[in-house]
Image (cartoon, rainbow, N blue to C red):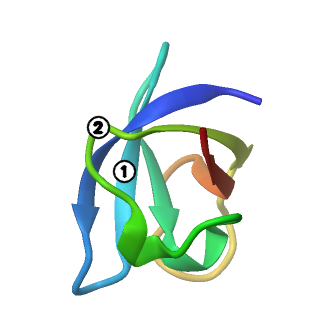
């Protein structure tokens, strides 16, 4: 699983962005967070995640995190 840090949280809308160790930022939605509540996450926190290439409904324009697990 890739590892990164939470770069930005938009708590009132329930999403955020992960800055991977290498590569472009990855979007994540609060429903993809495992083992912890979304509201307990903090910017700068290290997480591991799986990638989904998007393409489903919504406005996704690139990869997004399918599962986000705090380390």
**Is 65 on the left-hand or right-hand side of 46?**
right
The quarter in which the N terminus is drawn is: top right
Point out residue 59 in the picture as x, y percentages from the top left corner.
Answer: 44, 73
Query: 45 or 1, which lies in front?
Result: 45
Find numbered disc 1 in the image and state the secondary structure of the residue it sits on: strand
**Vertical placement of 37 versus 70: above or below?**
below
Circle 1 Cα neighbour tier, 10 Å, few/some/many (<14 / 14–19 / ≥20): many
Mark 2, residue position: 44
Crowding around mark 2 (Cα neighbors within 10 Å: few <14, some 14 to 19, many 20+) is some
| Horizontal and vertical percent position of residue 33 | 61, 66
Spot the residue most to the top. 22
User: From the viewer's perspective, is residue 33 above or below residue 37?
Assistant: above
Identify the residue at image location x=30%, y=54%: 42
Looking at the picture, how far across and down is residue 60, in whole percent? 50, 64
Q: Position of residue 62 (x, y in %)?
A: 52, 48
Tell me which numbered mark, 2 or 1, is placed earlier along the sequence. Answer: 1
Contact flag, marks 2 and 1 (Cβ < 8 Å): no
Name the image quarter holding residue 11: bottom left
Helix, strand or loop at mark 2? loop
User: Between 48 and 28, which is closer to the camera in this rendering?
Assistant: 48
Image quadrant holding the C terminus, namely top right
**Left or right for 12, reference 45:** left
Q: Residue at x 37, y 76 (%)?
A: 39
Foreground disc of the pair 2, 1 = 2
Q: Is residue 12 above or below residue 4?
A: below
Please give left or right for residue 49 compared with residue 28 in the image.
right
> At 45% across and 54% down in the image, what residue appears?
27
The residue indicated by pointer 1 is 17
């Amino acid at each position: 699983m890739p590892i990164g840090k939470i770069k930005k949280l938009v708590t009132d809308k329930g999403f955020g962005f992960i800055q991977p160790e290498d590569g472009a930022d990855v979007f994540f939605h609060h429903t993809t967070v495992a083992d912890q509540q979304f509201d307990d996450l903090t910017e700068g926190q290290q997480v591991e995640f799986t990638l989904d290439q998007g393409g489903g409904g919504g406005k996704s324009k690139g990869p997004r995190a399918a599962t986000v697990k705090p380390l």
